[in-house]
Amino acid sequence: MKKFIFLIVFLLTACPQKKEPKPSELSTPSTVKAEIQAAAFDELDGWKTDNLTEMLPTLQNNCRKISKTTTDWLGSSALKVDAGLYRKICEKFEQKQFAAASDLRKFIESNFTPFLVLDDGNAEGKFTSYYESQINASFHKHGKYQYPVYGKPYDLVEINLKDFDENLPNKRLVGRIDKQKMIPYFKRAEIENNGIKAPVLMWGDNLTDIHIMQIQGSAVAHMDNGEKIRVGYADNNGLPFRGIGSILLQNKLLAPNNANMIEIKKWLNQNPEEAKKYMQQNQRYIFHRIVNETGPVGAFGVPLQGGRSMAVDKDIIPLGSLMWLSTQTPDGKALNKLVAAQDIGSAIKGAVRGDYFWGSGGDDVLAAAGSMNSVGRYYILIPKGQRDGLD
Protein backbone atom coordinates (compact mmCIF):
# COMPACT_ATOMS: atom_id res chain seq x y z
CA MET A 1 0.00 0.00 0.00
CA LYS A 2 1.40 3.36 -1.00
CA LYS A 3 1.48 6.16 1.52
CA PHE A 4 1.37 9.84 0.64
CA ILE A 5 2.16 12.48 3.26
CA PHE A 6 1.09 16.09 2.80
CA LEU A 7 1.79 19.14 4.97
CA ILE A 8 -1.18 21.14 3.61
CA VAL A 9 -1.28 21.03 -0.18
CA PHE A 10 -2.41 18.08 -2.25
CA LEU A 11 -3.30 18.61 -5.90
CA LEU A 12 -5.87 16.39 -7.60
CA THR A 13 -6.89 15.98 -11.23
CA ALA A 14 -9.60 14.02 -12.92
CA CYS A 15 -8.22 12.40 -16.09
CA PRO A 16 -8.24 8.58 -16.18
CA GLN A 17 -4.79 7.05 -15.83
CA LYS A 18 -3.71 3.42 -15.69
CA LYS A 19 -0.68 3.65 -13.43
CA GLU A 20 -0.77 4.77 -9.82
CA PRO A 21 0.87 8.12 -8.99
CA LYS A 22 4.28 8.20 -7.38
CA PRO A 23 4.68 9.30 -3.75
CA SER A 24 5.31 12.96 -3.13
CA GLU A 25 5.67 15.28 -0.17
CA LEU A 26 4.60 18.89 -0.49
CA SER A 27 5.15 21.54 2.16
CA THR A 28 3.67 24.94 2.89
CA PRO A 29 4.00 27.36 5.82
CA SER A 30 1.18 25.54 7.65
CA THR A 31 2.01 22.95 10.30
CA VAL A 32 -1.15 20.97 9.63
CA LYS A 33 -0.32 17.47 8.47
CA ALA A 34 -2.68 15.08 6.71
CA GLU A 35 -1.71 11.66 5.49
CA ILE A 36 -3.44 9.48 2.93
CA GLN A 37 -2.91 5.87 1.94
CA ALA A 38 -3.98 4.50 -1.41
CA ALA A 39 -6.57 1.75 -1.04
CA ALA A 40 -8.81 -0.40 -3.21
CA PHE A 41 -12.60 -0.35 -3.37
CA ASP A 42 -12.66 -3.98 -2.21
CA GLU A 43 -11.12 -2.79 1.07
CA LEU A 44 -14.06 -0.49 1.83
CA ASP A 45 -16.49 -2.14 4.27
CA GLY A 46 -19.91 -2.34 2.65
CA TRP A 47 -18.84 -0.97 -0.73
CA LYS A 48 -20.59 -3.70 -2.71
CA THR A 49 -23.88 -3.42 -0.79
CA ASP A 50 -24.40 0.35 -0.50
CA ASN A 51 -27.46 1.46 -2.47
CA LEU A 52 -25.58 4.07 -4.46
CA THR A 53 -28.64 5.17 -6.44
CA GLU A 54 -29.67 7.06 -3.28
CA MET A 55 -26.61 9.20 -3.92
CA LEU A 56 -27.73 10.41 -7.36
CA PRO A 57 -29.39 13.67 -6.17
CA THR A 58 -26.25 14.61 -4.26
CA LEU A 59 -23.99 13.79 -7.21
CA GLN A 60 -26.21 15.81 -9.54
CA ASN A 61 -26.15 18.82 -7.19
CA ASN A 62 -22.38 18.55 -6.83
CA CYS A 63 -21.84 18.46 -10.57
CA ARG A 64 -24.18 21.39 -11.22
CA LYS A 65 -22.21 23.41 -8.71
CA ILE A 66 -18.79 22.35 -10.02
CA SER A 67 -19.81 22.93 -13.65
CA LYS A 68 -20.48 26.59 -12.85
CA THR A 69 -17.10 27.21 -11.26
CA THR A 70 -14.35 29.06 -13.10
CA THR A 71 -11.60 28.62 -10.51
CA ASP A 72 -8.63 26.30 -10.95
CA TRP A 73 -9.20 24.55 -7.64
CA LEU A 74 -12.12 23.54 -5.47
CA GLY A 75 -11.71 25.50 -2.26
CA SER A 76 -8.44 26.20 -0.51
CA SER A 77 -8.09 23.02 1.51
CA ALA A 78 -5.10 20.78 2.16
CA LEU A 79 -6.28 18.23 -0.38
CA LYS A 80 -6.95 20.21 -3.54
CA VAL A 81 -9.05 19.17 -6.51
CA ASP A 82 -8.33 20.54 -9.98
CA ALA A 83 -11.72 22.04 -10.80
CA GLY A 84 -11.22 21.96 -14.57
CA LEU A 85 -10.43 18.25 -14.61
CA TYR A 86 -13.15 17.47 -12.11
CA ARG A 87 -15.64 19.13 -14.45
CA LYS A 88 -14.74 16.55 -17.09
CA ILE A 89 -15.85 13.74 -14.79
CA CYS A 90 -19.11 15.62 -14.22
CA GLU A 91 -19.61 15.92 -17.98
CA LYS A 92 -19.31 12.14 -18.30
CA PHE A 93 -21.62 11.63 -15.32
CA GLU A 94 -24.33 13.87 -16.77
CA GLN A 95 -24.28 11.98 -20.07
CA LYS A 96 -24.95 8.62 -18.46
CA GLN A 97 -28.04 6.88 -17.15
CA PHE A 98 -27.68 4.80 -13.99
CA ALA A 99 -30.50 2.29 -13.82
CA ALA A 100 -28.97 0.33 -10.96
CA ALA A 101 -26.53 0.83 -8.11
CA SER A 102 -24.08 -1.47 -9.89
CA ASP A 103 -23.94 0.94 -12.87
CA LEU A 104 -23.00 3.85 -10.65
CA ARG A 105 -20.56 1.66 -8.73
CA LYS A 106 -18.70 0.82 -11.94
CA PHE A 107 -18.62 4.48 -12.96
CA ILE A 108 -17.12 5.53 -9.63
CA GLU A 109 -14.59 2.69 -9.67
CA SER A 110 -13.45 3.64 -13.17
CA ASN A 111 -13.01 7.34 -12.33
CA PHE A 112 -11.80 7.43 -8.73
CA THR A 113 -9.30 5.84 -6.37
CA PRO A 114 -10.06 5.65 -2.63
CA PHE A 115 -7.45 7.00 -0.23
CA LEU A 116 -7.62 6.43 3.51
CA VAL A 117 -7.27 9.74 5.36
CA LEU A 118 -5.07 9.81 8.46
CA ASP A 119 -4.42 12.47 11.06
CA ASP A 120 -0.70 12.31 11.82
CA GLY A 121 -0.70 8.55 11.26
CA ASN A 122 -4.04 7.80 12.97
CA ALA A 123 -6.86 6.59 10.74
CA GLU A 124 -9.54 6.79 13.42
CA GLY A 125 -11.38 9.96 14.29
CA LYS A 126 -14.56 11.31 15.83
CA PHE A 127 -17.88 11.31 13.99
CA THR A 128 -20.93 13.14 15.25
CA SER A 129 -24.21 13.98 13.55
CA TYR A 130 -26.54 16.91 12.99
CA TYR A 131 -29.98 17.41 11.52
CA GLU A 132 -32.41 20.01 10.21
CA SER A 133 -34.49 21.08 13.19
CA GLN A 134 -38.07 22.36 13.42
CA ILE A 135 -39.40 25.61 14.88
CA ASN A 136 -42.82 27.22 15.18
CA ALA A 137 -42.88 30.81 13.97
CA SER A 138 -44.85 33.79 12.72
CA PHE A 139 -44.01 36.65 10.38
CA HIS A 140 -45.41 39.01 13.03
CA LYS A 141 -44.52 39.46 16.69
CA HIS A 142 -47.58 38.59 18.73
CA GLY A 143 -48.72 36.30 21.52
CA LYS A 144 -46.19 33.53 22.14
CA TYR A 145 -44.08 34.52 19.11
CA GLN A 146 -41.58 36.75 20.89
CA TYR A 147 -38.14 35.51 19.81
CA PRO A 148 -36.60 37.04 16.66
CA VAL A 149 -34.86 35.00 13.98
CA TYR A 150 -32.33 37.49 12.65
CA GLY A 151 -30.97 37.80 9.15
CA LYS A 152 -27.46 39.10 8.53
CA PRO A 153 -27.03 42.41 10.41
CA TYR A 154 -26.73 45.63 8.44
CA ASP A 155 -23.69 46.68 10.48
CA LEU A 156 -21.78 43.39 10.27
CA VAL A 157 -18.49 43.89 8.42
CA GLU A 158 -15.80 41.40 7.47
CA ILE A 159 -12.15 41.55 6.48
CA ASN A 160 -9.52 39.06 5.40
CA LEU A 161 -6.12 39.59 6.98
CA LYS A 162 -4.38 38.52 3.80
CA ASP A 163 -5.97 41.43 1.93
CA PHE A 164 -3.87 43.78 4.06
CA ASP A 165 -0.58 41.88 4.08
CA GLU A 166 0.34 38.77 2.09
CA ASN A 167 2.42 37.60 5.05
CA LEU A 168 -0.66 37.42 7.25
CA PRO A 169 -2.79 34.26 7.39
CA ASN A 170 -5.79 33.76 5.12
CA LYS A 171 -8.16 34.45 8.01
CA ARG A 172 -11.62 36.02 7.96
CA LEU A 173 -12.61 38.36 10.76
CA VAL A 174 -16.08 39.77 11.35
CA GLY A 175 -17.08 42.67 13.54
CA ARG A 176 -18.59 46.14 13.45
CA ILE A 177 -17.35 49.69 13.10
CA ASP A 178 -17.31 51.91 16.18
CA LYS A 179 -15.62 55.32 16.11
CA GLN A 180 -13.79 54.47 12.88
CA LYS A 181 -12.39 51.25 14.37
CA MET A 182 -13.38 47.67 13.71
CA ILE A 183 -14.29 45.93 16.95
CA PRO A 184 -15.77 42.48 17.74
CA TYR A 185 -19.47 42.09 17.01
CA PHE A 186 -22.03 41.87 19.80
CA LYS A 187 -22.08 38.75 21.98
CA ARG A 188 -25.12 36.48 22.17
CA ALA A 189 -26.27 38.05 25.44
CA GLU A 190 -26.06 41.55 23.96
CA ILE A 191 -27.99 40.48 20.86
CA GLU A 192 -30.75 38.70 22.78
CA ASN A 193 -31.07 41.33 25.51
CA ASN A 194 -30.73 44.53 23.47
CA GLY A 195 -31.54 43.64 19.86
CA ILE A 196 -29.45 44.55 16.81
CA LYS A 197 -29.72 46.34 13.48
CA ALA A 198 -30.78 43.37 11.39
CA PRO A 199 -33.79 42.16 9.43
CA VAL A 200 -36.13 39.95 11.44
CA LEU A 201 -37.07 37.03 9.21
CA MET A 202 -39.71 35.70 11.61
CA TRP A 203 -40.58 35.37 15.28
CA GLY A 204 -40.24 32.03 17.05
CA ASP A 205 -42.24 30.77 20.02
CA ASN A 206 -39.44 28.95 21.86
CA LEU A 207 -35.94 30.23 22.64
CA THR A 208 -34.59 26.70 23.09
CA ASP A 209 -35.75 25.68 19.61
CA ILE A 210 -34.09 28.76 18.12
CA HIS A 211 -30.86 27.94 19.97
CA ILE A 212 -30.94 24.38 18.64
CA MET A 213 -31.63 25.74 15.15
CA GLN A 214 -28.49 27.85 15.47
CA ILE A 215 -26.44 24.84 16.58
CA GLN A 216 -27.72 22.79 13.65
CA GLY A 217 -27.48 25.70 11.21
CA SER A 218 -30.91 25.30 9.64
CA ALA A 219 -34.55 24.50 10.32
CA VAL A 220 -37.99 24.09 8.83
CA ALA A 221 -40.20 26.85 10.22
CA HIS A 222 -43.86 25.88 10.67
CA MET A 223 -45.59 29.24 10.30
CA ASP A 224 -48.81 30.14 12.08
CA ASN A 225 -50.45 30.75 8.68
CA GLY A 226 -49.86 27.14 7.64
CA GLU A 227 -46.77 27.73 5.50
CA LYS A 228 -43.53 25.80 5.84
CA ILE A 229 -40.42 27.93 5.35
CA ARG A 230 -36.89 26.59 5.14
CA VAL A 231 -34.35 28.66 7.08
CA GLY A 232 -30.63 28.33 6.35
CA TYR A 233 -27.32 29.64 7.60
CA ALA A 234 -26.30 33.16 6.53
CA ASP A 235 -23.41 34.21 8.78
CA ASN A 236 -22.25 34.42 12.39
CA ASN A 237 -20.95 37.05 14.80
CA GLY A 238 -17.40 35.68 14.73
CA LEU A 239 -17.18 34.94 18.46
CA PRO A 240 -16.23 31.60 20.10
CA PHE A 241 -18.67 28.69 20.19
CA ARG A 242 -19.44 26.74 23.37
CA GLY A 243 -21.79 23.78 23.25
CA ILE A 244 -24.78 23.99 25.58
CA GLY A 245 -24.24 20.36 26.59
CA SER A 246 -20.75 21.03 27.91
CA ILE A 247 -22.00 24.18 29.69
CA LEU A 248 -24.72 22.23 31.53
CA LEU A 249 -22.30 19.43 32.38
CA GLN A 250 -19.73 21.87 33.71
CA ASN A 251 -22.38 23.34 35.99
CA LYS A 252 -23.45 19.83 37.12
CA LEU A 253 -26.98 20.32 35.80
CA LEU A 254 -26.92 17.08 33.83
CA ALA A 255 -25.41 13.70 34.62
CA PRO A 256 -22.53 12.74 32.28
CA ASN A 257 -24.41 9.62 31.15
CA ASN A 258 -27.55 11.62 30.42
CA ALA A 259 -26.21 14.52 28.36
CA ASN A 260 -27.87 13.73 25.03
CA MET A 261 -29.76 16.35 23.03
CA ILE A 262 -33.20 15.12 24.10
CA GLU A 263 -32.31 15.51 27.79
CA ILE A 264 -30.59 18.84 27.10
CA LYS A 265 -33.69 20.16 25.32
CA LYS A 266 -35.92 18.83 28.12
CA TRP A 267 -33.89 20.61 30.81
CA LEU A 268 -33.79 23.88 28.87
CA ASN A 269 -37.55 23.89 28.34
CA GLN A 270 -38.22 23.06 31.99
CA ASN A 271 -35.92 25.83 33.24
CA PRO A 272 -36.45 28.75 30.81
CA GLU A 273 -34.95 31.53 32.95
CA GLU A 274 -31.82 29.58 33.87
CA ALA A 275 -31.66 28.21 30.33
CA LYS A 276 -31.33 31.68 28.84
CA LYS A 277 -28.43 32.47 31.18
CA TYR A 278 -26.57 29.29 30.29
CA MET A 279 -27.28 29.51 26.57
CA GLN A 280 -25.83 33.02 26.59
CA GLN A 281 -22.51 31.61 27.79
CA ASN A 282 -22.15 30.53 24.17
CA GLN A 283 -21.07 33.85 22.64
CA ARG A 284 -21.47 32.60 19.04
CA TYR A 285 -24.67 33.77 17.37
CA ILE A 286 -25.91 32.51 14.01
CA PHE A 287 -27.76 34.68 11.50
CA HIS A 288 -30.10 33.04 9.01
CA ARG A 289 -31.70 33.46 5.62
CA ILE A 290 -34.78 32.04 3.95
CA VAL A 291 -33.88 29.45 1.32
CA ASN A 292 -35.98 28.04 -1.50
CA GLU A 293 -34.39 24.64 -1.91
CA THR A 294 -35.37 20.98 -1.58
CA GLY A 295 -33.19 20.68 1.51
CA PRO A 296 -31.05 22.78 3.83
CA VAL A 297 -28.15 24.39 1.99
CA GLY A 298 -24.65 23.59 3.24
CA ALA A 299 -21.42 25.54 2.98
CA PHE A 300 -20.78 24.10 -0.50
CA GLY A 301 -23.89 25.94 -1.69
CA VAL A 302 -26.06 22.95 -2.59
CA PRO A 303 -28.96 21.25 -0.76
CA LEU A 304 -27.89 18.66 1.79
CA GLN A 305 -29.29 15.14 1.53
CA GLY A 306 -30.10 13.19 4.66
CA GLY A 307 -27.76 10.23 5.03
CA ARG A 308 -25.57 11.34 2.11
CA SER A 309 -24.06 14.67 3.18
CA MET A 310 -21.36 15.35 5.74
CA ALA A 311 -19.69 18.37 7.31
CA VAL A 312 -15.88 18.33 7.32
CA ASP A 313 -12.93 20.55 8.09
CA LYS A 314 -12.63 22.48 4.83
CA ASP A 315 -9.03 23.35 5.64
CA ILE A 316 -8.28 19.65 5.06
CA ILE A 317 -11.03 18.20 2.87
CA PRO A 318 -12.24 20.05 -0.28
CA LEU A 319 -15.96 20.76 -0.18
CA GLY A 320 -17.62 18.74 -2.92
CA SER A 321 -15.37 15.73 -2.42
CA LEU A 322 -16.80 12.23 -2.38
CA MET A 323 -16.02 10.32 0.81
CA TRP A 324 -16.49 6.74 1.92
CA LEU A 325 -17.62 6.83 5.54
CA SER A 326 -17.10 3.87 7.86
CA THR A 327 -18.39 4.33 11.40
CA GLN A 328 -21.33 3.35 13.65
CA THR A 329 -24.79 4.69 14.42
CA PRO A 330 -25.64 5.56 18.05
CA ASP A 331 -27.14 2.08 18.57
CA GLY A 332 -23.93 0.39 17.41
CA LYS A 333 -24.97 -0.58 13.88
CA ALA A 334 -22.41 -0.32 11.08
CA LEU A 335 -22.66 2.86 9.03
CA ASN A 336 -20.78 2.33 5.77
CA LYS A 337 -21.82 4.51 2.86
CA LEU A 338 -20.84 7.00 0.19
CA VAL A 339 -21.27 10.62 1.28
CA ALA A 340 -20.27 14.04 -0.02
CA ALA A 341 -18.36 16.70 1.88
CA GLN A 342 -20.84 19.56 1.56
CA ASP A 343 -20.85 21.43 4.84
CA ILE A 344 -18.71 22.74 7.69
CA GLY A 345 -19.13 23.29 11.42
CA SER A 346 -17.35 25.30 14.10
CA ALA A 347 -16.54 22.11 16.05
CA ILE A 348 -15.51 20.08 13.00
CA LYS A 349 -11.74 20.42 13.01
CA GLY A 350 -9.07 17.90 12.05
CA ALA A 351 -8.04 15.58 9.25
CA VAL A 352 -10.32 12.75 10.43
CA ARG A 353 -13.42 14.51 11.76
CA GLY A 354 -16.91 14.42 10.32
CA ASP A 355 -20.44 15.53 11.15
CA TYR A 356 -22.94 13.25 9.43
CA PHE A 357 -26.16 14.90 8.24
CA TRP A 358 -29.01 12.76 9.53
CA GLY A 359 -31.83 14.56 7.75
CA SER A 360 -34.87 16.62 8.70
CA GLY A 361 -37.31 15.92 11.51
CA GLY A 362 -38.44 16.40 15.07
CA ASP A 363 -37.37 14.87 18.37
CA ASP A 364 -36.99 11.38 16.88
CA VAL A 365 -34.32 12.62 14.48
CA LEU A 366 -32.85 14.83 17.21
CA ALA A 367 -32.49 11.76 19.43
CA ALA A 368 -30.45 9.94 16.80
CA ALA A 369 -28.41 12.89 15.59
CA GLY A 370 -27.82 14.34 19.04
CA SER A 371 -26.50 11.10 20.53
CA MET A 372 -24.06 10.10 17.80
CA ASN A 373 -20.48 10.21 19.04
CA SER A 374 -18.73 7.41 17.19
CA VAL A 375 -15.21 6.41 16.28
CA GLY A 376 -14.66 5.78 12.59
CA ARG A 377 -12.64 6.48 9.50
CA TYR A 378 -13.17 7.80 6.02
CA TYR A 379 -11.65 7.62 2.58
CA ILE A 380 -11.47 10.46 0.09
CA LEU A 381 -12.20 9.43 -3.50
CA ILE A 382 -9.53 11.02 -5.66
CA PRO A 383 -10.05 11.28 -9.42
CA LYS A 384 -7.82 8.93 -11.35
CA GLY A 385 -5.17 10.60 -13.45
CA GLN A 386 -3.95 12.88 -10.68
CA ARG A 387 -0.63 14.39 -11.73
CA ASP A 388 0.25 17.75 -10.17
CA GLY A 389 2.45 17.29 -7.14
CA LEU A 390 2.83 13.53 -7.51
CA ASP A 391 5.41 13.20 -10.27
Image (tube, grey):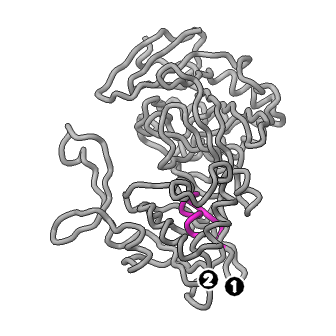
State whether residue 340 is above or below residue 108: below
Nearest to the observer: residue 127 or residue 53: 127
Reading the chain from its start, which is encountered first: label 2 or label 1? 2
Residue position marked by numbered label 1 in the rendering: 225
Q: Residues within 10 Å of mark 1 (few under 14, many from 20)?
A: few
- Is 312 a magenta residue? no
> In the picture provided, is 98 more to the left or to the right than 377?
right
Q: Residue at (58%, 51%) from the top-left corner? A: 302
Of all residues, the one furthest to the bottom in this rendering is: 143
Mark 2 near mark 1, Cβ–Cβ under 8 Å?
Answer: yes
Q: Position of residue 45 (x, y in %)?
A: 75, 24
The quarter of the picture where the C terminus appears is top left
Rounded to the nearest angstrom, the CA distance separating label 2 from label 1 is 8 Å
Q: Position of residue 361 (x, y in %)?
A: 73, 61
State whether residue 150 is above or below residue 160: below
Q: Residue at (62%, 20%) from the top-left corner? A: 113
Q: Which residues are magenta?
A: 210-221
Residue position marked by numbered label 2 in the rendering: 138
Q: Position of residue 100 (x, y in %)?
A: 84, 34
The quarter of the picture where the N terminus appears is top right
- Is 217 a magenta residue? yes
Would residue 249 be visible to someone looking at this image?
A: yes
Nearest to the observer: residue 110 or residue 355: 355
Q: Residue at (64%, 24%) from the top-left corner? A: 111
Q: Residues within 10 Å of mark 2 (few under 14, many from 20)?
A: many
Nearest to the observer: residue 144 or residue 249: 249
Quarter of the image holding residue 297? bottom right
Type of the residue with mark 1? Asn
Type of the residue with mark 2? Ser
